[in-house]
Amino acid sequence: MYNIDKFMAELERKNAAQPEFIQAAKEVVESVIDIVNANPAYIKANVLERITEPDKVFMFKVEWEDDNGIPQVNKGIRVQFNNAIGPYKGGIRFHPSVTLGGLKFLGFEQIFKNSLTTLPMGGGKGGSDFNPKGKSENEIMRFCRSFMTELQKYIGPDTDVPAGDIGVGKREIGYMYGQYKRLRDENTGVLTGKGLNWGGSLIRPEATGFGAVYYADEMLKNKKDTLKGKIVSCSGFGNVTWGTCIKATELGAKVVTISGPDGYIYDPDGVGTEEKFEYLLELRASNNDVVAPYAKKFPNAKFFAGKKPWEEKVDMAFPCAIQNELNGDDAKALIKNGCKYVIETSNMGCTPEAIEAFLHAKIAFGPGKAANAGGVATSGLEMSQNSMKLSWSREEVDEKLKIIMKRIHDAGLKYGKEKDGFVNYVKGSNIAGFKKVADAMVELGY
Ligand code: 2IT
């Protein structure tokens, strides 16, 4: 039998100074402890100790030349956390906040997220503390090339398949895939999020945002509610926010906020036209990491410097930016303003205090590892197409994504429904994601 306090104390001792990893692990362990203690096979297999230790971690130096001809150095990391149900799969993040502990949290989350997709993918994550802000195109290309020169030693289409994350989009995937091909002379599905002309899948760029809105739609249906006429706040302004704005608008909602490290934008007309969607892509491609220019381009919109969008009155909130972007005070502000649904579209976007506040107020809360799984699910569909040397149509991929998001929602509902009818999607999704991986680990031995 596991004692949760003892187990967590030991995990903290073994992973000192990795608070984000401990936060992610604690949430999962709290959710699954009862089913683990009720299953002698899990106890006998020491499943909690084994699932919280990464299979492998690679760290390497990335040297690259800046535009002044000066050598620069960054850290490169790949965490291969768990491959019990399939090859390691998960994104690469380029952001100055990247650390080993941060990537361990993301790799750990990815295990259960990938399990929830119902596709055969294990969990991994990688990245670098390289800051794309202010870098030229050529500097980004040289960095990506050097990063892949090291990373290619550890990955492969049946071993470990990286993709994008914060700071890594189609452009960066292109430069990395180009270098992989140069070094290995292979055309394989070793990366996902590829361009359409060189092995990518339709809908992959939109998939995280689309998936989060499909997931939200299922949450609404479960409460006999609809997206039509809902006022929505989003944070972030990158790929995930872009996809969320497009799909939420299409299904009849109005997105009134986006945000960046510099503050947030309130757009009373909604971020809901082709021109505005295109503009988000331009903002991200400019490498400036600011949203303030949006208010100059669309003068009805207002910019609030240094503030977060959670102070606005909305029906639904989609944190789409980065971990712990929505804290306990933000949650209280949203609840006070009548927000009914929170869809955690970023990985661990809400602090434990925020989640506690939402659950306590009986707000429908969709946790990241379920709500944002559409991105990696569509990566899985890209891998399938690469293996078959075929491309599916937009409609085929979109239909599959929709079915997957409904299954993910229903799994959370199955294991998370409480006696009074309230659905604790955090607990439900953690249990559903965990069981499949834990069973595989028991069956595979050690
Ligand atoms: O957090 C995530 O799920 C991603 N960044 C996507 C990972 C993937 O392999 O597509």
Image: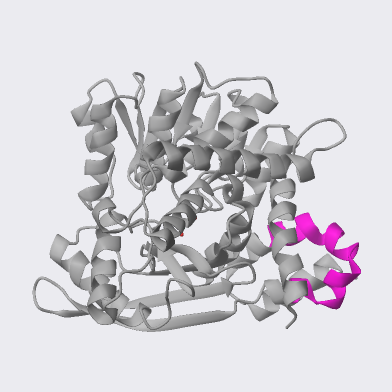
Magenta run includes residue 30: yes
The C terminus: image quadrant: bottom right
Seen from the viewer's position, the closer of residues 282 and 6 is: 282
Left of 134 or right of it: where is 208?
right
For residue 185, which quarter of the picture? Answer: bottom left
Residue 325's place in the image compared with 2, above or below, is above
Residue 396, position as x, y percentages in the image? 44, 40
Residue 49's place in the image compared with 240, above or below, is below
Left of 118 or right of it: where is 74?
left
Left of 234 or right of it: where is 46?
right
Q: Tell me, yes or no, if residue 324 can be seen here.
A: yes
Q: Tell me, yes or no, if residue 318 can be seen here.
A: no
Magenta run includes residue 161: no
Count the marks: how many? 0
At a point 51% along the width and 80% down the height, the residue shown is: 57
Residue 437's place in the image compared with 232, above or below, is below
Residue furthest toward the top? 229
Residues in magenta, as a range = 26-49
Residue 283, position as x, y percentages in the image? 24, 43
Dominant secondary structure of the magenta stretch?
Answer: helix
Seen from the viewer's position, the closer of residues 351 and 283 is: 283
Residue 402, position as x, y percentages in the image? 53, 37
At a point 34% along the width and 18% down the height, the residue shown is: 269
Residue furthest toward the left? 68
Residue 16's place in the image compared with 135, above or below, is below
Residue 87, position as x, y percentages in the image? 53, 70
For residue 262, which quarter of the picture? Answer: top left
The N terminus: image quadrant: bottom right
At a point 22% along the width and 77% down the height, the residue shown is: 182
At a point 81% along the width and 77% down the height, the residue shown is: 45
